[in-house]
Amino acid sequence: MLPKILLTVLIVLAVFYGYRHLKRVAGRIGGGAGPQPTVKPDPPPPAVEETSRCPVCGTYVVKGRGRRCERPDCPFPG
């Protein structure tokens, strides 16, 4: 039983170190391009948005993006 475990560990280690070696060699061959330019990511949207209360139905909607409800007297467009 012990020889099987040792053989398995040796195979795993051989694959791991072989992969590391191949990555290192591939980096030397194709790595002459220099560092990649970094792209600044867009800032995340605000976590909290300003809301206003609807005078008709009393629900709160995001300011500037109020959506029309099913009520005929809804003051919000769209």
Image (cartoon, rainbow, N blue to C red):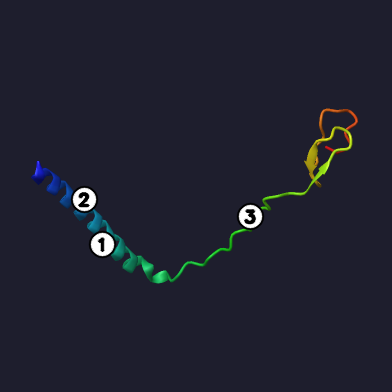
> SS of the residue at dot 3?
loop
Residue 60 position by quadrant: top right
Q: Position of residue 14 (x, y in %)?
A: 19, 55
Which residue is at a point 53% across and 65% down the rendered structure image? 38
Q: Could you say which disc has been placed on residue 21 in the image?
A: 1
Which residue is at a point 21% across and 50% down the rendered structure image? 12
- Marks 2/3: CA–CA distance: 42 Å
Q: Which residue is mark 3?
A: 44
* 2, above or below 36, in the image: above
- Marks 1/3: CA–CA distance: 39 Å
Please name whichever residue, 55 or 29, is drawn nearer the observer in this view of the structure.
Answer: 55
Q: Position of residue 10 (x, y in %)?
A: 16, 52
Which residue is at a point 23% across and 58% down the rendered structure image? 17
**Precedes in sequence: disc 2 or disc 3:** 2
Q: Residues within 10 Å of mark 1 (few under 14, many from 20)?
A: few
Name the amino acid, label 1: His
> SS of the residue at dot 1?
helix
Quadrant in the picture for the N terminus: top left
* 15, above or below 65, in the image: below
Q: How many discs appear? A: 3
Residue 25 position by quadrant: bottom left
Name the amino acid, label 2: Val
Which residue is at a point 37% across and 68% down the rendered structure image? 31
